[in-house]
């Protein structure tokens, strides 16, 4: 396929505090990774690379087989690194064939729905080097220093970034090859390399499951809308 999706699932989930890596924690009887893959597979046809924690590649393959069925030949599993950026780099190294557009997606955003995948791809097809889904910031934001407010921040200028984030493959590979520091997301890394990153509408369902409260929210959403 012309499109690839790298699903990064190699984190340990320190803030969730479960007894196994976060991607394998169950939302219902299915893991976060299984939910994320099911929604990726509902989107446009793509090569999929799952980046798994070292020692849990077999668990990732189990989820891939369950989610992908007879499309499993489109999916590969590789071992991640100690940072998210290292895990994405491992996924990039595993791409094969004539992929032109690469999406990077957090397995922890397990409920991200298929239309956001279509929106970021469409932005790249329309000529952007990169495109990410964003939501407006709801809270009133303050800049704080030394225990007091030093500036009001105009929240209309702010957006909360989500995944899947899409890039031209050549742009993303080149930006990773020159990245000198650790960036918080792929959009920041690509922007630091001098490229313009467009924004598209995100989705509230694409929230990242980070804390036990986030997992509770995902569980109640999935109970109402099972796979
Ligand atoms: N990730 C990864 N490799 C890492 C770290 C993170 O593939 N070395 C992935 C996670 O699996 C997750 C996504 O990046 O899907 C977003 O990271 P985050 O939500 O921070 O997950 P964890 O790093 O696992 O959680 P924590 O920071 O609480 O330990
Ligand atoms: Mg983390």
Image: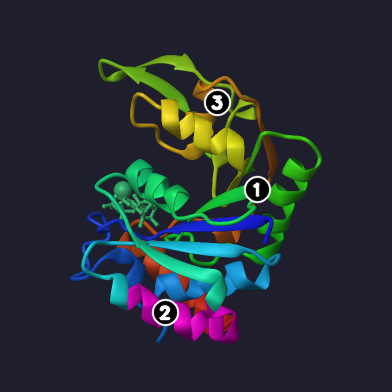
Q: Secondary structure at mark 1?
A: strand
Quadrant showing the C terminus: bottom right
Q: Position of residue 124 (x, y in %)?
A: 73, 42
Q: How is the image coloured?
A: rainbow
Magenta range is 59-72
- The residue indicated by pointer 3 is 191
Q: Secondary structure at mark 2?
A: helix
Label 3 within 8 A of ligand 1 by Cβ:
no
Q: Secondary structure at mark 3?
A: helix
> For the residue carrying disc 3, how many other residues have a C-alpha within 10 Å: few (<14), some (14-19), or many (20+)?
some
Identify the residue at horizontal 73%, vertical 34% (top origin).
128
Q: Give the alpha-carbon distance from disc 1 to disc 2, as whole Å.
A: 24 Å
Query: Is residue 65 on the magenta stretch?
Result: yes
Q: Position of residue 90 (x, y in %)?
A: 38, 50
Q: Does any portion of residue 25 appear in the rendered image? A: no
Q: Answer with the quarter of the image where residue 148 lies.
A: top left
Identify the residue at horizontal 35%, vertical 46% (top origin).
84
Label 2 within 8 A of ligand 1 by Cβ:
no
Q: Position of residue 45 (x, y in %)?
A: 69, 67
Would you say 8 lies left or right of 192 here?
left
Q: Position of residue 42 (x, y in %)?
A: 66, 72
* Of residues 28 and 181, the one drawn nearer to the viewer in this rendering: 181
Would you say 84 lies left or right of 6 here?
left
* Of residues 149 and 61, the one drawn nearer to the viewer in this rendering: 61
Q: Does any portion of residue 169 appear in the rendered image? A: yes
Quadrant showing the N terminus: bottom right
Residue 17: which disc?
A: none
Instruction: Name the outermost residue toward the right.
Output: 126
Residue 101: which disc?
A: 1
Would you say 144 lies left or right of 19 here?
right
Camera-side mark, 1 or 3: 1
Identify the residue at horizontal 48%, vertical 60% (top origin).
109
């Amino acid at each position: 396929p012309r499109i690839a999706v790298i699903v990064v699932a190699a984190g340990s989930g320190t803030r969730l505090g479960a007894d196994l890596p976060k991607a394998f924690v169950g939302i219902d009887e299915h893991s976060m990774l299984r939910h994320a893959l099911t929604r990726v597979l509902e989107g446009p046809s793509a090569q999929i690379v799952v980046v798994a924690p070292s020692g849990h590649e077999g668990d990732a393959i189990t989820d891939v087989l369950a989610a992908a069925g007879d499309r499993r030949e489109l999916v590969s599993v590789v071992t991640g690194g100690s940072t998210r950026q290292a895990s994405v780099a491992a996924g990039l190294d595993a791409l094969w064939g004539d992929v032109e557009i690469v999406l990077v997606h957090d397995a922890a955003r397990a409920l991200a729905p298929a239309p956001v995948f279509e929106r970021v791809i469409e932005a790249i097809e329309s000529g952007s080097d990169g495109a990410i889904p964003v939501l407006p910031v709801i809270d009133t934001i303050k800049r704080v220093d030394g225990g007091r407010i030093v500036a009001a921040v105009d929240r209309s200028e702010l957006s909360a970034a989500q995944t899947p984030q899409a890039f031209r493959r050549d742009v993303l590979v080149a930006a990773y090859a020159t990245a000198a520091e650790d960036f918080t997301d792929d959009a920041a890394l690509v922007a630091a390399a001098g490229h313009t990153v467009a924004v598209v509408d995100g989705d509230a369902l694409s929230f990242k499951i980070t804390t036990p409260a986030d997992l509770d929210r995902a569980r109640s959403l999935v109970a109402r809308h099972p796979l």
